[in-house]
Image (cartoon, helix red, strand yellow):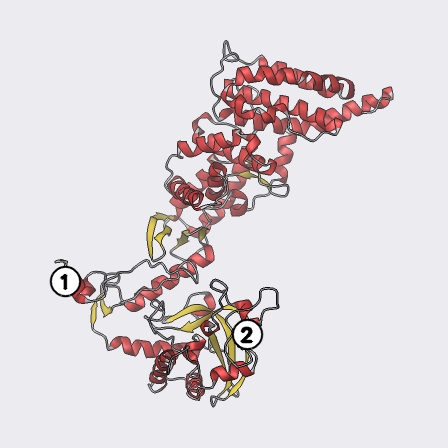
């Protein structure tokens, strides 16, 4: 049924349970234990699912200790109003025609009012020598099992708020767990349906038919502690709406049938949990209305298609052709597989949700597309913004970065609330670029490029990751220039050539430092920011700094140095007229030239080293 597929049944909700109590079919206590916090499907009312902050609103079956235990009393209280409300509600259910044997057994047990005493006897509830509940515990001592599952509030535990779930062990009953018993769930649904039929019906604005309307709508769409609601109002009386001069009664303001609201919220909650993209409070989810699997548009190419790149790397090493063509062919095959399943007429929905306050949620983005439109735009995004990505030593691929990676490349990791807001705003701005095919934001690209140029302010792994992302953004923004993902030796653009020069200089000094066993940044790395702002004047400084390293290489690696000097001469010869002496700021194009030239040099270094070592063996010199 629905619970097994992940959907919460009608008039139910998911809560984290802390204590499990086992009873027999006659309502006699058998045992109790603390369990690891586990999501448990429990029956709920419209009020208990949405309004349990300060009001006394019990769940029908599984609830906190203070609701279930008749012998629990707050300090100074004569009775337990929580228990009385809980007992009255479960009694009403058990006395109806929709009762269930397990619910009846639980009612018989709680009416004995020995629950707290039984939990103390079983060692579940920690108490002091006078049998009073403990609420604090020394941090250096081993915590009781229950305190390990509860979250303290300023060092104070609230064991009375531990959630109880029940087991009723009846002979020949294969499902003693009440949260798994579909017969019990159906009994509660029938009970609620009968009560709904007794309510005044009105027009549901979703279905267009008359039904019992919801007065409270579910929350917890994004998780167990999410109190923000998609549909809510602060006015609950008819008179609150009448005086506004627009309505005759409250149901005219937002009329949604109770079951319709629960089904819609349950389905959306399931979709978010199953395939939603999360960025703090921001959630974006895409789905096919037919239920077919679709590619997640918010992942990078590697996570989305899991495209192998072994052959791509081989092509790059042994061929001068654009590796992007190989990537595009493989991407086409993966997209073609989805086209076969989805077809061209099936609807795809993309929705973004976010909340500006703890209690209010809004739909920040909503699009409906056909399957063919959706796949076309996802394919274009991953083709146009594809580049060599180097996320880590074990994660290298050719493809497009995810929106979250782009936000991190532009602004860094979200370590405070200000950066978190920037990240969410950036991801939201990228949605239309992926789904609607809109232009990429120029300022976001410029921010990422400026940040990567400040190489001294980045860790090495962060520089390598953000370099590939920045190149992706520049290549995608200027897609009409048709940049290839392999070194373009015939491209004579000033910025591209300057990037190539910087890569060669960085490689020469880096190889010399490696031979000497020195571990420090090269001059090209340290001066990258200044080079991006003033390339001509900075290049003179970098070139002069290479002299001692060239002398070292001339002795140790003559073949390597000879090839690098040829590379420098070749690049210098491609500058047109006065482009070389022009000291204006470089665009992000220089990163493309830098990255492609550097990759080409890395792939060929082994060949140069082999030649130098062979010559060294003949002369008796050490390499």
Relative to 577, say whether 127 is above or below: below
x and y, in percent, of residue 140 in the image? 61, 64
The crowd level at tag 1 (other Cα within 10 Å; few <14, some 14-19, many 20+) is few
x and y, in percent, of residue 570 in the image? 61, 15
Q: According to the image, label 2 marks what residue? A: 34
Relative to 309, say whether 617 is above or below: above
The C terminus: image quadrant: top right
Q: According to the image, label 1 marks what residue? A: 242
x and y, in percent, of residue 604 in the image? 68, 27
For the point 46% across and 35% down, the residue is: 384
For the point 36% across and 56% down, the residue is: 358
Residue 393 is at least partly visible in this image: yes
Relative to 104, say whether 532 is above or below: above
Q: Nearer the viewer, residue 384 or 589?
A: 589
Q: Nearer the viewer, residue 172 or 215?
A: 215
- Residue 122, numbered label: none
């Amino acid at each position: 049924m629905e619970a097994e597929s992940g959907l919460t049944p009608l008039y139910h909700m998911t809560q984290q349970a802390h204590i499990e109590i086992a009873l027999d079919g006659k309502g006699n206590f058998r045992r109790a234990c603390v369990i690891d916090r586990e999501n448990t499907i429990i029956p709920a009312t419209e009020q208990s699912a949405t309004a349990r902050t300060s009001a006394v609103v019990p769940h029908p079956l599984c609830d906190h200790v203070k609701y279930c235990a008749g012998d629990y009393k707050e300090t100074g209280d004569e009775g337990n109003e929580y228990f009385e409300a809980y007992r009255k509600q479960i009694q009403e259910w058990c006395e109806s025609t929709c009762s269930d044997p397990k619910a009846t057994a639980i009612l018989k047990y709680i009416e004995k009012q020995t629950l707290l005493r039984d939990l103390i006897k079983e060692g579940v509830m920690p108490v002091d020598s006078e049998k009073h509940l403990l609420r604090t515990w020394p941090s250096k001592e081993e915590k009781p099992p229950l305190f390990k599952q509860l979250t303290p509030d300023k060092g104070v535990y609230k064991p009375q708020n531990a959630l109880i779930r029940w087991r009723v062990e009846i002979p020949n009953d294969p499902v003693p767990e009440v949260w798994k018993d579909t017969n019990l769930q159906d009994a509660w649904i029938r009970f609620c349906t009968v009560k709904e039929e007794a309510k005044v019906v009105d027009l549901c604005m979703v279905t267009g038919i008359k039904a019992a309307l919801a007065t409270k709508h579910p929350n917890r769409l994004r998780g167990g502690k999410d109190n923000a609601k998609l549909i809510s109002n602060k006015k609950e009386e008819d008179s609150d709406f009448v005086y506004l001069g627009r309505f005759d009664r409250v149901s005219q303001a937002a009329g949604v049938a109770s079951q319709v609201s629960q089904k819609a919220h349950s389905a959306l909650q399931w979709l978010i949990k199953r395939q939603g993209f999360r960025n703090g409070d921001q959630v974006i989810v895409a789905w096919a209305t037919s239920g077919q699997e679709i590619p997640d548009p918010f992942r990078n190419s590697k996570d989305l298609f899991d495209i192998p790149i072994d052959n791509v790397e081989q092509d790059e090493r042994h061929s001068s052709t654009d590796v992007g063509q190989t990537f595009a062919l493989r991407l086409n095959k993966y997209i073609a597989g989805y086209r076969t399943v989805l077809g061209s007429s099936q609807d795809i929905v993309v929705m973004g949700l976010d909340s500006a306050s703890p209690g209010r949620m809004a739909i920040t983005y909503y699009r409906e597309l056909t399957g063919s439109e959706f796949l076309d735009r996802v394919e274009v995004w991953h083709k146009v913004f594809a580049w060599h990505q180097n996320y880590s030593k074990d994660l290298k691929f050719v493809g497009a970065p995810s929106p979250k990676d782009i936000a991190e490349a532009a602004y860094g990791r979200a370590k405070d609330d200000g950066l978190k807001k920037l990240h969410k705003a950036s991801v939201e701005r990228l949605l239309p670029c992926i789904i609607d095919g809109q232009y990429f934001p120029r300022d976001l690209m410029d921010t990422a490029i400026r940040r990567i140029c400040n190489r001294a302010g980045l860790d090495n792994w962060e520089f390598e990751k953000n370099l590939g992302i920045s190149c992706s953004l520049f290549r995608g923004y200027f897609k009409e220039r048709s940049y290839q993902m392999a070194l373009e030796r015939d491209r004579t653009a000033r910025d591209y050539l300057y990037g190539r020069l910087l890569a060669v200089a960085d490689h020469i000094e880096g190889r010399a430092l490696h031979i000497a066993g020195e571990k420090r940044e090269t001059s090209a790395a340290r001066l990258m920011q200044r080079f991006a702002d003033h390339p001509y004047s900075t290049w003179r400084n970098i070139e002069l700094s290479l002299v001692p390293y060239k002398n070292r290489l001339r002795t140790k690696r003559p073949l390597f140095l000879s090839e690098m000097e040829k590379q420098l001469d070749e690049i210098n010869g491609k500058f047109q007229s006065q482009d070389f002496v022009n000291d204006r700021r470089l665009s992000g194009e220089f990163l493309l030239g830098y990255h492609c030239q550097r990759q080409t040099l890395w792939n060929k270094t082994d060949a140069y080293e082999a030649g130098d070592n062979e010559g060294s063996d003949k002369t008796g010199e050490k390499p």
